[in-house]
Image (cartoon, rainbow, N blue to C red):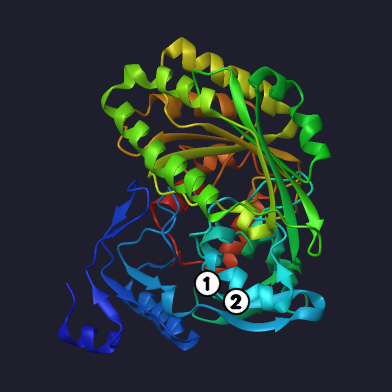
Amino acid sequence: MSSARDRRAAGPHARWNTRWSNWARTEHSRPELEIVPRRTEQIELAVQRARDTARTVKPVGASHSFTGVAATDGIRIDMSRMRGLVSADPARGRVTLWGGTHLWELPAILAPLGLALANMGDIDRQTITGATQTGTHGTGVRLGGLATGVIGATLVTGAGDTLVIDEDHHPELLPAVALGLGALGVLVTVTLQCVPRYLLRAEEAPAGLDEVLDGFVERTREADHFEFFWFPHTRSARTKTNTRLPLDAERDPLTPAARFADEEFANNLAFGACTAFGSVAPAAIPRVNRLIETLSSRRSYTDESHRVYITHRRVRFHEMEYGLPLDAVPEAMRELRAMIERRRYRVSFPVEVRSAAADGLLLSTASGRQTGYIAVHRYWRDRDRGYFRDAEAILASHGGRPHWGKMHTQTAGTLRDRYPAFDEFAAVRDRLDPDRLFGNPYLTRVLGE
């Protein structure tokens, strides 16, 4: 219970005992104190306050993770007032951003500088720190996840100190800090290596699932970006191949009417109605999915990269995703398909398959190996966890590593063997947060005490 003195000391931009939920409604907590800082010094004070009062402290961005990685009952730091551009070096393609900056804000920041992100996922609601800290990625076997573009950061550590981390200052910490699960401190700023603006030529088409799986590895290695979606209970997949083009190439964007018909009507209104119906009448799901399959058509368009990457998704869902060795994806998908039919699960959401380049980040799902990603989803009101449990068993059996921001049941004991640099990350954590001020139950489960 907070005292009047505590309330005065917290300052005007503070809230007490507010309830927090993530976007997927899978995690909840009630922070004793929430602050909304405007300056680094206020974050330092919040960390020191946590030390003095034996509380934990956690920064929270857009709350788009499906796990409890950002949950706290202690002090919550809302980064929403620390957004936007700090500095830029267009000649070297570098920008420094405040940690609360959302991905959807980046095109307006980067475009005037002639820059863009090298790759993106299909959702842009996250903050740049939330996305990088949990290992958010797009697709493209020659391109890394967002965290591989982090070349510098300003971090408030568990001691309340502010460290500059880049190629000239503490460079040995960068492979841990770039993707640190929020376990190492509060990222105040992030410096990104960007690329010149570019266009993407998108080609979307249906194809038989077996055909897609047979050619998956080759097709993934040939394309700049390749992914596909498969609706369970159907025989075909929807493929999407994006080809990178120079900015002065001819554009052929989707018209506003076409974008509305596809994204708002088909992907949100109609699909939302189908999944809601399926949650109360699961026996109808296979027929609904096969109807959706018959409506899948070909289309192609060319536009600025961020307009091609991003799809606005308003239907709430739960998600589990694992990164597997690239060559293991086809067999894992076939096992997943067989399991769904054998166990008679009724699954309304598609399975999504993507890829990423190998990287050197200590806790990246693509650390040290080319990676294929398999993501399974459930409508958020569907309480059946059997599908996720059985899917996880298959994905984990192929050497899979769970996405840090998505649902899974792995523990430090099982994850240590999957990450060669796990103990190296633990040593960095001991250095930057020896008292576990940034800890919470999720981090204790996946990283240990």
- Res. 390 in view: yes
State the residue in front, 299 or 189: 299
Q: Which numbered marker is on residue 101?
A: 1
What whole-number distance in Å separates the C-alpha atoms at marks 2 and 1? 7 Å
State the residue in front, 404 or 124: 124
Q: Are marks 2 and 1 in contact (CB under 8 Å)?
A: yes
Q: Is residue 142 above or below residue 39?
A: above
Q: Quadrant of residue 177?
A: bottom right
Amino acid marked by disc 2: Leu
State the residue in front, 66 or 438: 66
Q: Quadrant of residue 5?
A: bottom left
The residue that appears at 52% across and 72% down in the rendered structure is 101
Residue 423 image point, x, y percent: 64, 51
Q: Is residue 320 left or right of residue 273?
A: right
- Res. 165 in view: no
Q: Find the residue positioned furthest to the top.
A: 342
The residue that appears at 42% across and 48% down in the rendered structure is 67
Residue pointed to by mark 2: 97
User: SS at mark 1?
Assistant: loop
